Amino acid sequence: MYMLYLDESGGVTENDQNYYVLGGISVHEKKPFFLSKDLDSLQKKWFPAVTDPIEFHASHIRNGKGEPWESMGKPDRLKLLNEMASILIGTAETTVSLFAVAMHKPSLPHQNPISRTCEEIAGHFDATLARIEAEHNTKERGLMIF
């Protein structure tokens, strides 16, 4: 089974934001445990004195938003982001896929952004599962987690 972890950005009702974005990562069901361990190791490497989990939000890291990112220089933050990306691509024994759909809300004023982006993501996820099935001659299932 492949799990697709999704999150949104750009709020449905915020009139000052023209885009609604739904994005996420799909991994085989066995992968999250190992990804979590790798991220825990990354936290220990970069923040050895911190015992509570740190949330690794790419936009916060890149922009130095909030602690511990405000206290970290931009070159180090970019190096950390590269190490995070290496975790995603360097240890993949199974398919790891990134998904995103951006909807320009003013262009589709009568469509619900949540419904529209979920429908598109589901179609892309289904196509990815079909490709994996064809490549590995297996039957795969998918679970979308919001």
Image (tube, helix red, strand yellow):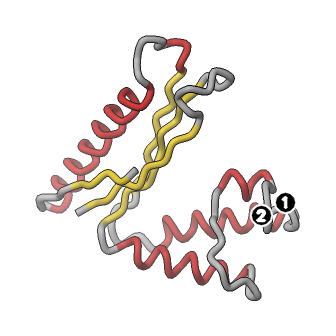
Residue nearer the viewer, 140 or 54:
54
Residue extending farthest front:
13
Identify the residue position indicated by label 2 in the image. Answer: 77
**Callout 1: few (<14), some (14-19), or many (20+) C-alpha neighbours within 10 Å?**
some
Q: Position of residue 25 (x, y in %)?
A: 43, 55
Q: Position of residue 35 (x, y in %)?
A: 47, 74
Within the image, what quadrant is residue 66 found in? bottom right
Amino acid found under the numbered disc labelled 1: Lys
Q: Residue at x 80, y 65 (%)?
A: 67
Residue nearer the viewer, 7 or 32:
7
Say the numbered circle drawn on residue 74: 1
Q: The N terminus appears in which quarter of the rendering?
A: bottom left
106 left or right of 63 in image: left
Total labels: the figure holds: 2
Q: Residue at x 50, y 26 (%)?
A: 103
64 left or right of 105 in image: right
128 left or right of 64 in image: left
Q: Position of residue 58 (x, y in %)?
A: 65, 56
1 and 2 marks in contact (CB < 8 Å)? yes
At numbered mark 2, what does the secondary structure look like: helix, strand or loop?
A: helix
CA gap between label 1 and label 2 equals: 5 Å
Amino acid found under the numbered disc labelled 2: Arg
Residue nearer the viewer, 114 or 133:
114
At numbered mark 1, what does the secondary structure look like: helix, strand or loop?
A: helix
Q: Residue at x 41, y 70 (%)?
A: 92
**Callout 2: few (<14), some (14-19), or many (20+) C-alpha neighbours within 10 Å?**
many
